[in-house]
Image (cartoon, rainbow, N blue to C red):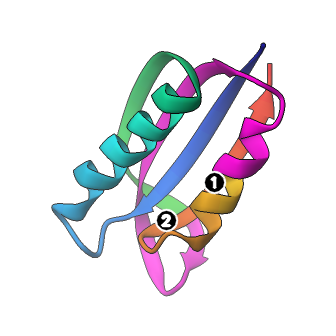
Amino acid sequence: MSKYEAVVVFSVKNGDDVSALVEKFKALIEKSGTLESVDEWGKRRLAYLINDEAEGYYVLYNFESAPEFPAELERIARITDGILRSLVVKK
């Protein structure tokens, strides 16, 4: 088991859908590992436009899991609507 952190930038276009996506990823991480903390940074202005959006909702997840899970988490983030960017790094 290794420690990881994931930063996910959610689209704020859908409004209420952001909290549902935050909970979806929280549940996904808890299912495959140990979630240590969730730090919601909130809505912030992006440095450049992503999909014609100037703002995003940032969330930092700290977790511990098997080495195979971060790649699966990034794959799910890429195919999920409502996510602008994501990054998972090993601590």
Note whether 76 is above or below 82 in the view shown. Answer: above
Q: Which quadrant of the figure has residue 18? A: bottom left
Question: Gap between marks 2 and 1, in whole Å?
Answer: 8 Å
In percent of the image, x 52 and y 62: which residue is there? 46
SS majority, magenta: strand
Q: Residues within 10 Å of mark 1 (few under 14, many from 20)?
A: some
Question: Which residue shows up at 46% across the image and 16% down it?
Answer: 37
Label 2: few (<14), some (14–19) or many (≥20) C-alpha neighbours in 10 Å: some
**Residue at (44% x, 44% y) in the render:** 25
Helix, strand or loop at disc 2? strand
Question: In the image, is residue 39 above or below residue 41?
Answer: above
Q: Is the Cβ of the residue at disc 2 closer than 8 Å to that at disc 1?
A: yes
Find residue 23 and report its horizontal and vertical position in percent: 31, 42
The part of the chain drawn in magenta is 47-73
Left/right placement of residue 49 relative to residue 5 reads left
> Residue 21: image x %, image y %?
34, 54
Is residue 64 left or right of 2 when viewed as pictured? left
Q: Amino acid at mark 1?
A: Ser
Foreground: 77 or 69? Answer: 69
Classify residue 56 by image quadrant: bottom left
Amino acid type indicated by mark 2: Ile
- Report the disc number at residue 83: 2
Comparing 81 with 69, the one in front is 69
Q: Give percent across and percent down for residue 8.
A: 54, 49
Q: Residue 86, labelled with which disc?
A: 1
Residue 69 inside the magenta-drawn segment:
yes
In the rendered image, the quadrant that contains the N terminus is top right
Question: In the rendered structure, does residue 7 fall within the stretch colored magenta?
Answer: no
